[in-house]
Amino acid sequence: MKSLVESQMVIIFGATGDLTRRKLIPSLYHLERKKLLTRCTPIVCLGRQDYSREEFLQSLDINGSVDNLNSQVWQSLAERIEYHRMDLESVLADDFQSCIAGIRQRYACAGNSLVYLALPTRVFQGTARLLSTLQEQTGWLRVVFEKPFGEDARSAAELNASIRSVLDEEQIFRVDHYLGKELVQNILTLRFANTLFASAWDSKSIDHVQITVSETLGVEKRAGYYDRSGAVRDMVQNHLLQLLAFVAMETPKSPNPESLRDEAVNVIRQLEPVAREDVVLGQYLEGEVDGDRVSGYCQEPGVAADSTTETYVAFRALIDTERWRGVPFYLRTGKRLGRRFAEIRLVLRQSADTAAIFGPVAANTIIIRIQPDEGIALAFNVRSPGESGRTESVLMDFCHHCHFGPNTPEAYEAILRNVMLGERNIFPRWDWIEASWHYIDHLRAVAARPVGYAAGSSGPLEADTLQAGNHHVWHEGVTRQILPLPFHHVRRSD
Ligand code: BG6
């Protein structure tokens, strides 16, 4: 693995939030464990809470977020973690600048800075004046913006203009952590490094595609953010459309990251506007998840009793390109569903000859399991032994963990590593974000109000009306009929 030997200061805004505790600090720990950080990498955490350094370190609850913590590694990282109370709205730019300069002097560090804005999108603009003070230093400045980038096309454009007034495009890293997931990065290898799959990847072979991100979690303690956002803006504008772009893009013209990003943008620009009857929104009602009774969305703390925010969305997307014209892409995501998984299924067409000889058989299907139990499977038909000679669907199954071991980097580790290396391929470019917001704004405008679904179910029954034929199926029951094998038979042991 390429080393990140350059010294750099990591500055985290919003350091007392969940993201820092659950993802950023554990990812920095893993980079430290792999010896990818130099001793000259102070981690400067800025937040509004009045913590001492010790209290802040305690609040990180590192034992709770890292398995089998190596205390020596943690000690060496923790020594470099600083905490400073700072209110972004009131802090003077000069005070910020001298705080950073003081730390830099103490660590005798070069001028490189990685700034991570783990903040709500509406606060991003307020950081511009502070970021401009870092422009004066020597060395590189890279600024990471957490998703969502804006709340709609207009606010995203305003935000972009504001940060572009102080930062160059190559200093800006807009995060979509799904692009850091190993199996998402694998989609391109699967497609473009395998003749077998490359030749099946178009409307001649593919009947339809299903992209599903199903969560068992509810809104947790994020009502303040989530109730303004809803599933479409929280999950579809970014994660699901990125998955769609990776599945549907044309072959990048060169290995240059910009070529990859060009092709991703092209997919989003070629999406046809969604029709009202092709989108179903849902909101979870009380029910049972993993054996526990859970309350409905409107009874969650911080959510208004009459909230109409959607916690589920399913829709049919069509892409107007030579490769995909007429092939439906079904995308769905929801909170408080019965099972946690994210996967992509490409269901292949069946030829008339097959039916004439064998009668109805299961469709060949390519399954990319993003999580859990990461892997790639291919369902195909074989003759079962014995007199009957029945046709049965079986799986060829590649289990990522079994083959590569348990040390696959987590998405945020890949994200931090790539920013440190200045590698941009897993970060959406502004034109991608702009195009996706236009698509999403339209979808939100046409969608009917959310319908209820029981927590622990597979979403609203209304979503099944999106089916456009017998094998355009959504819910698990029917999916299992197509593919009767247990996909999640390989369990992680770590
Ligand atoms: C985040 C959303 O971007 O992704 C959350 O804001 C969601 O609502 C999360 O739970 C899902 O990420 P993952 O990696 O757990 O699938």
Image: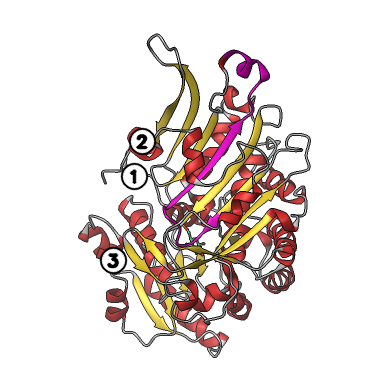
The residue labelled by disc 3 is: 62
Q: Is residue 361 above or below residue 286?
A: above
- Distance from Cα at disc 2 to Cα at disc 1: 8 Å
Q: Report the side of 368 relative to 233 (left or right).
A: left
- The quadrant of the image that shows the N terminus is top left
Q: Position of residue 171 (x, y in %)?
A: 62, 62
Q: Is disc 3 placed on a helix, strand or loop?
A: helix
Q: Residue at x 76, y 55 (%)?
A: 275
The residue labelled by disc 1 is: 407
Q: Position of residue 320 (x, y in %)?
A: 78, 43
Q: Position of residue 271 (x, y in %)?
A: 75, 49
Q: Residues within 10 Å of mark 3 (few under 14, many from 20)?
A: some
Q: Earlier in the sequence, mark 3 or mark 2?
A: 3
For badge 1, the amino acid type reads: Asn
Provide the residue span drawn in magenta: 333-357
- Distance from Cα at disc 3 to Cα at disc 2: 26 Å
The residue labelled by disc 2 is: 404
Q: Residue at x 60, y 49 (%)?
A: 464
Q: Residues within 10 Å of mark 1 (few under 14, many from 20)?
A: few
Give the mark count: 3
- Distance from Cα at disc 3 to Cα at disc 1: 18 Å
Q: Residue at x 47, y 63 (%)?
A: 454
For badge 3, the amino acid type reads: Ile
Q: Position of residue 488 (x, y in %)?
A: 37, 40
For badge 2, the amino acid type reads: Phe
Q: Nearer the viewer, residue 149 or 292?
A: 292
Q: Is residue 140 above or below residue 240?
A: below
